[in-house]
């Protein structure tokens, strides 16, 4: 049986190898480190959770040196899996966003039925779902579906159809809305481009039908958003506070804003990077 020291040494060597050589497949790592592919997958899962590598397409890639934290990342490529990998890596390196994702995952129980909307802040929940059994997850984002299918827990993943929207990197439109409406979920994880303390979540994008369908189909609607979104003034109301159960944000929200939101029937959870 391998000692914990030898496991740690191998994982450090895996990180060094992938950082040096770029995208590397599981089978190549298994051959190089003279171990099984099952062991390598466990190594990559652990390293991914630590934010040291990104699991992708049966292997791993390095964590990007620079990554965007915007809710709808723009990219010069159409590879949505790379976008999601960058988002997850950025979230792991950002204590505030990572804490929001961890707090969101704490609301999830084994066997839960989840629907996850597009956005890098909603993506922050993904690594923290890795140890939860028997999940059923629907998403409108290819990259989220790809990330989930790499999980050792093998959640049931449902993908909506519809029309691909390059800005949000997700499927939108009437077909997507109809499919979401055909299911029911325990929790909907929704992001926010902006937050209006008096109204709810707001956006410049008029493609808000799928988000509203997700909220309507879920018993609990959880919005994940950093406090800086309270300074973003946008014209289109996406979800009113009456449609939102929980807001998870960071400790920089003012006491006044927190109280105003709570007075509209929303539970506000503060996700501190310290975990306190």
Image: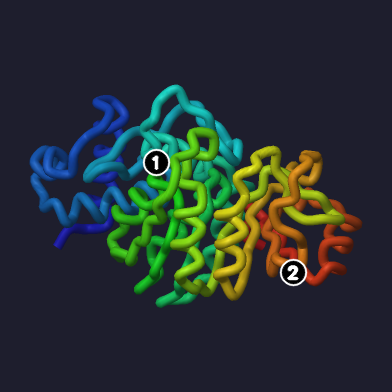
- Find residue 246 and report its horizontal and vertical position in percent: 69, 66
The first of marks 1 and 2 along the sequence is 1
Distance from Cα at disc 1 to Cα at disc 2: 33 Å
Q: Residue at x 41, y 40 (%)?
A: 85
Towards the viewer: 254 or 14: 254
* On-image quarter of the N terminus: bottom left
Question: Comparing marks 1 and 2, which lies closer to the viewer?
Answer: 2
Q: Is residue 124 visible?
A: no
Instruction: Specify the quadrant that holds the C terminus.
Output: bottom right
Q: Secondary structure at mark 1?
A: loop
Residue furthest top in the image: 76
Location of residue 111 (image quadrant):
bottom left
Quarter residue 28 falls in: top left
Question: Percent from the top left, x then y, of residue 35?
Answer: 11, 50
Secondary structure at numbered mark 2: strand
Q: Which residue lies under the disc numbered 2?
A: 267
* Numbered badge on residue 52: 1
């Amino acid at each position: 049986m391998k000692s914990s020291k030898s496991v740690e040494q191998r994982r450090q060597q895996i990180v060094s190898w992938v950082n040096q050589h770029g995208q590397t497949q599981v089978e190549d790592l298994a051959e190089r480190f003279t171990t099984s592919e099952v062991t390598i997958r466990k190594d990559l899962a652990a390293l991914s959770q630590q934010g040291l590598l990104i699991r992708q397409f049966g292997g791993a890639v390095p964590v990007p040196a620079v990554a965007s934290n915007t809710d709808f990342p723009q990219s010069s490529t159409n590879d949505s899996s790379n976008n999601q990998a960058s988002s997850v890596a950025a979230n792991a390196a950002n204590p505030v966003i990572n804490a929001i994702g961890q707090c969101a995952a704490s609301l999830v129980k084994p066997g839960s039925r989840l629907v996850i909307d597009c956005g890098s802040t909603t993506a922050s929940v993904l690594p923290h779902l890795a140890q939860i059994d028997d999940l059923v997850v629907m998403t409108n984002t290819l990259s989220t579906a790809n990330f989930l299918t790499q999980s050792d827990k093998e959640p049931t993943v449902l993908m909506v159809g519809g029309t691909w929207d390059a800005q949000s990197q997700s499927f939108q439109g009437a077909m997507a809305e109809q499919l979401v409406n055909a299911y029911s979920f325990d929790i909907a994880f929704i992001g926010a481009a902006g937050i209006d303390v008096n109204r709810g979540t707001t956006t410049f994008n008029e493609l808000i039908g799928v988000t509203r369908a997700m909220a309507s189909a879920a018993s609990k609607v959880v919005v994940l958003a950093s406090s800086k979104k309270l300074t973003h003034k946008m014209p289109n109301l996406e979800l009113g506070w009456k449609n939102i159960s929980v807001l998870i944000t960071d400790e920089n929200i003012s006491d006044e804003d927190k109280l105003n939101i709570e007075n509209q029937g929303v539970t506000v959870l503060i996700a501190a990077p310290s975990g306190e």
